[in-house]
Amino acid sequence: MNTQKLESYVDNILVVDDTPDNLRLLSIMLSDKGYKVRGVINGEMALKAARSTPPDLILLDITMPQMNGYEVCQHLKADGRTSGIPVIFLSALNQVLDKVTAFAVGGVDYITKPFDLEEVLARVENQLTIQRLQKKMHEQNARLQDSEAKERQKSQQLELALQQLQNAQAQLIQSEKMSSLGNVVAGVAHEINNPISFIKGNLSPVREYTEDLLRLVQLYAEDFPNPTAAIQEQLEAMDLTFLRKDLPKLIASMSIGADRIEEIVQSLRNFSRLDEAELKAVDIHEGLESTLMILQHRLKDEAAQTIIKVVKEYEALPKIECYAGQMNQVFMNVLTNAIEALQSPIGWANDVDDSSPIPTITICTKLLSDFQVGIYITDNGRGITEDIQQRIFEPFFTTKKVGTGKGLGLSISYTIVVDDHGGQLRCFSIPDHGATLAIEIPIHQSKKGFYKEDWVGL
Ligand SMILES: Nc1ncnc2c1ncn2[C@@H]1O[C@H](COP(=O)(O)OP(=O)(O)O)[C@@H](O)[C@H]1O
Ligand SMILES: [Mg+2]
């Protein structure tokens, strides 16, 4: 009969009946069929027995003194430990109302006395099979939920891995781009360096020689006031008086030009800092200045008809231990964004209203504590809305036209400031009034993590 039962498992049945004869009869019959049977004679004991060792099935008499079968069943159903146990009611009563009540309080079946043994066994086995199948279903459901959760977790892991890959790729692309820019800049700087040294070095002898020559000409003129016709002709053709006045000016302006080229070369070298791939204490202001120098043509862009004012509010700062080339890239990325925000169609640059403020970038540096400095780059451009602010550090996030923005500048800057220097890179903006990018970094890399919590800019 119990073919569906597991070999090792014996179903456990609790029989509750206040008539000892009934109890004995059912117990013997069920035990003979291989069930483990416990018998109790009242509701109180039934509840106790069911709670201490929950049976697989309860046969429950309805008419009992003190607590009747319905009440016992209600208690069983109200308790989480016993609510799942199927209850078959036993009763001599054979009224429709009782059956309805029996099902209403949670019974699953109903057997009337006197018992027909075959019927009792069939109903018991029925309920046990249902119970087993339900258990199996629950287990399978739980397994399914479990594997669903695992699948979900797996796909989350995949998503994360993908994101990390994208980040890594973005960094590769950007660092490749920046290092080739750095290489070009360093190469140009190096190539220009020698010729400009020649020019600069030779300028002062040139000045001396020309002065000597002019003095000699002067002496000739004084000693030979009546030159030959050929000399006279040459003197007039070359306009000696003008030449004498103009030549020193010319040499002076060549010297200014050479000095300027030398400064530019120095800035280019500062910017690329190829020789300084290692951590080194540097003057942050020097980095900012050389970056501004490189961006000079964009600050005064005649084609775009923009002149962007740069206001510097530098505080005296100690030297900052950092990867200078990388920090310059951060300045470059942030300043470029500020310039682009000021050049955008909604920006001030194209606003014809005279009352519009002058497009301005303010660079402010602050000593935040003994351990930390802040560099705040503010523009009065179109600003950044709240929802865009949430995303600006994501790789490939851009609001610029296809082909212009790559969406990498800020994500790379974030990696450099936060991951490589243990600092913070944050954005503050009032839409339509401008944006501030706050770069806060430790002064010493060994003091990473000493943050000043409050942002002091704006
Ligand atoms: N100063 C700023 N003003 C307004 N928007 C900005 C500013 N800086 C960054 N953003 C926004 O952040 C986005 C991401 O910047 P970035 O990572 O440098 O990529 P990209 O400049 O290539 O778009 C920009 O597309 C822009 O929407
Ligand atoms: Mg950018």
Image (tube, rainbow, N blue to C red):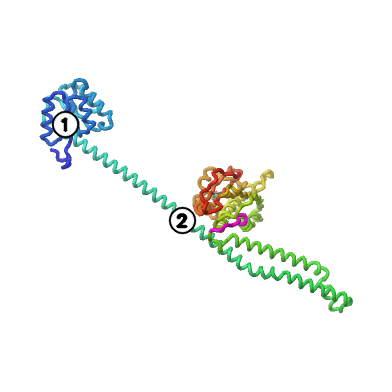
24 shown above or below 295? above
- x and y percent of residue 183 in the render? 55, 64
- x and y percent of residue 398 in the render? 52, 50
129 shown above or below 93? below
Q: Can residue 193 be seen by looking at this rendering?
A: yes
The residue that disc 1 covers is 38
The disc label shown at residue 371, or none: none
Q: Quick check: marks 1 and 2 in contact, CB under 8 Å? A: no
Q: Identify the residue shown where x is 68% and y is 43%.
A: 355
Q: CA distance from mark 1 to mark 2?
A: 68 Å
Graded by Cα atoms within 10 Å as few (under 14), some (14 to 19) or many (20 or more), the crowding at tag 2 reads some
Q: Which residues are magenta?
A: 279-286
Q: Can residue 295 be seen by looking at this rendering?
A: no
User: Disc 1 or disc 2, which is closer to the eye?
Assistant: 1
Graded by Cα atoms within 10 Å as few (under 14), some (14 to 19) or many (20 or more), the crowding at tag 1 reads some
Identity, as a three-letter code, of the amino acid under mark 1: Arg
- x and y percent of residue 243 in the render? 80, 69
Whichever of labels 1 and 2 marks the residue nearer the N terminus, that label is: 1
The disc label shown at residue 168, or none: 2
* Horizontal side, residue 224 vs residue 392: left or right: right
Give yes or no for residue 309 being in the magenta stretch.
no
* Residue 190 figure quarter: bottom right
Quadrant (top left, top right, bottom left, bottom right) of the N terminus: top left
385 shown above or below 200? above
- x and y percent of residue 315 in the render? 64, 50
Q: Secondary structure at mark 1?
A: strand
298 shown above or below 233? above
Q: Identify the residue shown where x is 36% and y is 46%.
A: 152
Q: Secondary structure at mark 2?
A: helix
Question: Is the CB–ligand 1 distance for label 1 below 8 Å?
Answer: no
